[in-house]
Image (cartoon, coloured by chain):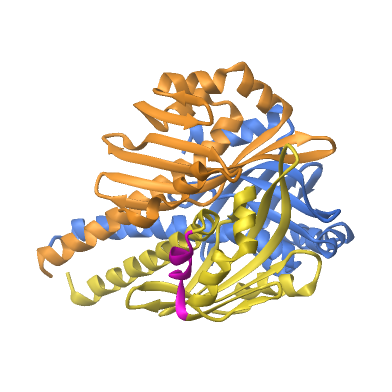
Chain colours: A blue, B yellow, C orange
Amino acid sequence: MDEDRFARLEQRVRRLEDELEITRLIASYGPLVDAGAAGAVAQLWTEDGEYDVEGWHMRSRADVHAMVESAAHRSLIEAGCSHFLGPAQIVVDGDAALAVCESLLVRRADAGFRVWRAGANRFQLTRTPRGWRITHRVTRALDGAAAARDLLRATVAGA
Amino acid sequence: MDEDRFARLEQRVRRLEDELEITRLIASYGPLVDAGAAGAVAQLWTEDGEYDVEGWHMRSRADVHAMVESAAHRSLIEAGCSHFLGPAQIVVDGDAALAVCESLLVRRADAGFRVWRAGANRFQLTRTPRGWRITHRVTRALDGAAAARDLLRATVAGA
Amino acid sequence: MDEDRFARLEQRVRRLEDELEITRLIASYGPLVDAGAAGAVAQLWTEDGEYDVEGWHMRSRADVHAMVESAAHRSLIEAGCSHFLGPAQIVVDGDAALAVCESLLVRRADAGFRVWRAGANRFQLTRTPRGWRITHRVTRALDGAAAARDLLRATVAGA
């Protein structure tokens, strides 16, 4: 058994671990934000990570924390809602990664629930000493405008 | 190449296999329950596994089987429905695991479909000689009540 | 360290890589088709791959490309829509694989969005020199008809 062959296999395993760690991170966003767990949501980003969503541009963990604690968000979760993210397409490149997924904002209404918004999401992530974190997330409504469609193409050309 | 280093890599691979096996198990619930495949759905649980969903507390495989065969469930699938589960956030700890995801119950209505319920789900799982199985699943509507939000926080503190 | 033990571990790692590659492929369908990226969508299939969806049976990459470029599809995405696929249950068997998932077609309507269709999807895939590709995808509406329910059972008996 030579060292090189073993090192290559270790590298492949690390690549799989990276991908599953990012999968877990993105899968945790919806549950945590719908629970109102502001501290845990903020920890998904780097200290100066950004979240740019339809006219609300957060530029730090503190901004993300404030969004989850805001009256607007609290009224959403108290009335009943689901930030439902689909499976992400993840592309890892060394210590950086890109992930694209669609999302639905579902709110309680009438006797059931309604889809309030369908969105396109692009996440840029970085490996930190404490694990993968989001550096930049952009979300745009899938309302026919080009902005959302451009986000969805993010993985086609690159990585 | 020393034995310890090899054993550590085997352990990391097993951890990834566990996580993907649980991913498959949870991803199969919706398709199987919408197909009315009662036997296959029941096999996702341990013999005495529990499924506690909004006033219906099943306490065994036989109970889960009976739910899928019930007139209520059959009328759901014959009218057209989707038990749509999102990607699960999975935390494996030795022979136990915890998974959290949100879900939508979508039913045919009018000219299209409607979201009947958005739910929070917490799965507790155990490793058995025949693979991972659910020991306890709790589902609560995301209707603004604290019960659902508490389930969504399940992975924050622990495991 | 013996060669056999190392080869077995390599095989397990490859199996995990296969499963995650297919996960990425299926997770990319919705974003790419909603972006109108016809070339990239067509590349998810083999050259003579089929996509059979509710009265539209495509039999090649060129057919899939034409669907994405069609006036019908363009009007969908220009009005705002999400082809939202759930997490797939993936079963790999050597150079072939089977995947089952549910999907929602969500369209902009009124002040928000509506679920136009809930569907059952079965993907058959093959390993090619350039990676995994779809050879046959069948999608049927979850409208109570047996056709959709049969697709959802695909992984129960086989693989």
Question: C80 or C54: which is nearer to us?
Answer: C54
B43 magenta-colored: yes
B50 magenta-colored: no
Q: Which residues are magenta?
A: B37-47
Position of B151 relative to B37 (above/below): below
Q: Give residue C151's quadrant in the image.
A: top left
Q: Percent x, y for residue A39?
A: 71, 69
> How many marks are shown on the rendered structure?
0
Q: Give residue C81's quadrant in the image.
A: top right
Q: Give residue C123's quadrant in the image.
A: top left
- Residue at 45% of width from left, 47% of height from top? C150
Q: Percent x, y for residue B126?
A: 44, 78
Q: Percent x, y for residue B21?
A: 40, 64
Q: Is residue A60 visible?
A: no
Q: Is residue B126 visible?
A: yes
- Residue at 38% of width from left, 53% of height from top? C155
